[in-house]
Image: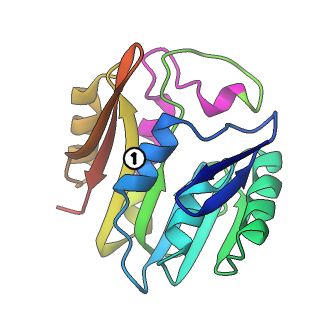
């Protein structure tokens, strides 16, 4: 099954997180400048990486799920985007270099479930286990004037996210939000302090 977003056609896979409201909110909030180098963590179907690739000079999309990497590669070919590369990585484990923009739609639901697909939404007891790991590492991969965009939910303790960003020398600003059933989704923008 394909979904259509902006001018992209995105194929899906039953074992890969399908783009939903959180994906669309993040994709619409991204500010990509011509020449930017972009990293998309947890790329899934590749929708964020492919949206960024329309303006960026180069994009790296990474995911823990090998089926997601293969799906994102197929979607890049389907959309004729050659300036994007995908590879397997547990957050930054296979990433090197620094980026102008780093985007992350993390697992943010307050549940603990196993399985590759379930890990795409399972954020631990309060929903921010993976996000806190990301925040503790992201600064080292960000250029001096770089920007980090990440998704969070009203189900998450936003104060803890703000504190973790501050402790990592990063700012906290909500730049987009959308009410959906049972929660409000947020896009947080962070930059080096």
Judge left or right: residue 54 versus residue 45: left
Percent of width and height locating residue 19: 60, 41
Q: Between 133 and 179, which is closer to the camera in this rendering?
A: 179
Mark yes or no: residue 122 visible: yes
Judge left or right: residue 105 versus residue 159: right
Residue that appears at 79% across and 42% down: 1
Image: magenta residue range: 118-136
Q: Secondary structure at mark 1?
A: strand
Residue 120 covered by magenta stretch: yes
Residue 122 covered by magenta stretch: yes
- The colour mode here is rainbow
Residue that appears at 20% across and 47% down: 172
Is residue 45 depicted above or below 128 in this figure? below
User: Which quarter of the figure has residue 174?
Assistant: top left
User: Which quarter of the figure has residue 50?
Assistant: bottom right
Judge left or right: residue 11 versus residue 56: right
Residue that appears at 27% across and 44% down: 176
Percent of width and height locating residue 97: 52, 76
Q: Between 181 and 91, which is closer to the camera in this rendering?
A: 181
**Residue at which label 1 appears:** 150
Percent of width and height locating residue 40: 54, 59
């Amino acid at each position: 099954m394909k979904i259509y977003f902006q001018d992209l056609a995105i194929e899906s896979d039953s074992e890969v997180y399908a783009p939903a409201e959180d994906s669309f909110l993040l994709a619409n909030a991204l500010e990509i400048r011509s020449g930017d180098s972009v990293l998309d963590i947890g790329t899934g179907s590749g929708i964020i990486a492919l949206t960024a690739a329309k303006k960026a000079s180069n994009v790296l999309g990474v995911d823990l799920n090998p089926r997601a990497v293969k799906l994102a590669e197929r979607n890049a070919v389907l959309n004729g985007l050659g300036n994007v590369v995908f590879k397997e990585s547990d957050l930054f484990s296979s990433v090197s270099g620094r980026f102008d923009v780093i985007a992350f739609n993390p697992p943010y639901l307050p549940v603990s479930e196993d399985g590759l697909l379930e890990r795409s939404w399972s954020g631990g007891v309060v929903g921010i286990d993976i996000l806190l790991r990301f925040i503790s590492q992201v600064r080292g991969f960000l250029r001096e004037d770089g920007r980090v965009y990440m998704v969070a939910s009203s189900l998450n303790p936003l104060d803890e996210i703000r504190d973790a960003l501050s402790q990592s020398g990063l700012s906290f600003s909500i730049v987009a939000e959308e009410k959906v059933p049972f929660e409000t989704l947020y896009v947080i923008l962070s930059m080096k302090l």
